Image (cartoon, helix red, strand yellow):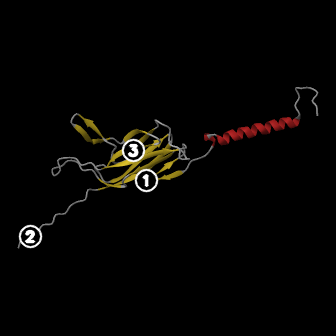
């Protein structure tokens, strides 16, 4: 069918154009990260992660149980710090590591990533419980020090809206019992 005026459209052409536009918009929306729904929990070694921000954050302590650190007292004039290494890994859902020079934010509920220092040395009453850590190929390690109080330490790591956590049980220092013998 020929159109007499080049400015006129055939009604079937208008419907076709509308369908193509709708399909294009829906296709773009379905392929965009903001249009997809990828929230949920991802398990990792030593902890779990939420990949709502399209990243899987894994927190893996080398030890799941530690003995508490011991401060100086009359019987022990020095401080004994109990420590372990924690591996932080950030990957995309397909396993691709986080981009170079990425930074994660860490917090801990017990224990510390270090202690503040003064001119005379470390101040154990001022633990460092928040830290930022740069990643190399989506991974890095941090030293975690057990606190001076027994309990559970939860280490939380955040990267671009995704979070992961791991726990470490901090046990009290074992008490030693001394046996006394009586001479007869």
| Viewer-side residue, 54 vs 87 | 87
Q: 62 left or right of 78? A: right
In the shown orientation, is residue 40 left or right of residue 26? left
- Front of the two marks 1 and 3: 3
Label total for image: 3
Q: Residue at x 29, y 50 (%)?
A: 82
Q: Which of the image's four quarters has the C terminus?
A: bottom left
List the residue tagged with mark 2: 182
Q: Is residue 47 above or below residue 142?
A: below
Residue 7 position in % (x across, y down):
88, 26
Q: 129 or 62: nearer the eye?
A: 62
Q: Residues within 10 Å of mark 2 (few under 14, many from 20)?
A: few
Separation of marks 1 and 2 at Cα, in angstroms: 50 Å
Alpha carbons under labels 2 and 3: distance apart: 53 Å
Label located before the other in sequence (1 or 2): 1
The residue lying toward the viewer, choosing from 9 and 2, is 2
- Give me the disc on residue 141: 3
Q: Quadrant of residue 182?
A: bottom left
Q: CA distance from mark 1 to mark 3?
A: 14 Å
Nearer to us: label 1 or label 2: 1
Q: How many C-alpha atoms fall within 10 Å of the one at disc 1: few (<14), some, or many (≥20)?
A: some
Image coordinates for residue 90, horizontal then vertical, percent: 48, 44
144 is higher (above) or lower (below) than 99: below
* Pointers 1 and 3 in contact (C-beta within 8 Å): no
Q: Between disc 2 and disc 3, whose residue precedes?
A: 3
**Residue at the spot of label 1:** 46
At x 24% / y 50%, what residue is drawn? Answer: 70
Give whichever of discs 1 and 3 has the lower sequence position.
1
Residue 173 placement: quadrant:
bottom left
């Amino acid at each position: 069918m020929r159109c007499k005026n080049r400015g006129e459209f055939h009604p079937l052409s208008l419907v076709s154009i509308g369908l193509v536009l709708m399909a294009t918009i829906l296709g773009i929306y379905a392929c965009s990260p903001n249009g997809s729904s990828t929230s949920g929990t991802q398990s990792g070694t030593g902890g779990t992660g939420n990949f709502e921000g399209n990243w899987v954050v894994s927190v893996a302590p080398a030890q799941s149980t530690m003995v508490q650190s011991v401060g100086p007292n009359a019987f022990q004039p020095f401080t004994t710090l109990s420590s372990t290494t924690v591996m932080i890994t950030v990957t995309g859902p397909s396993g691709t590591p986080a981009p170079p020079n990425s930074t994660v934010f860490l917090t801990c509920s017990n224990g510390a990533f270090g202690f503040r220092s003064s001119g005379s040395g470390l101040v154990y009453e001022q633990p460092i419980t928040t830290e930022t850590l740069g990643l190399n190929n989506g991974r890095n390690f941090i030293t975690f020090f057990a606190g001076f109080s027994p309990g559970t330490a939860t280490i939380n790591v955040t990267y671009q809206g995704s979070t992961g956590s791991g726990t470490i049980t901090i046990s009290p220092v074992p008490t030693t019992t001394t046996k006394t013998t009586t001479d007869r």
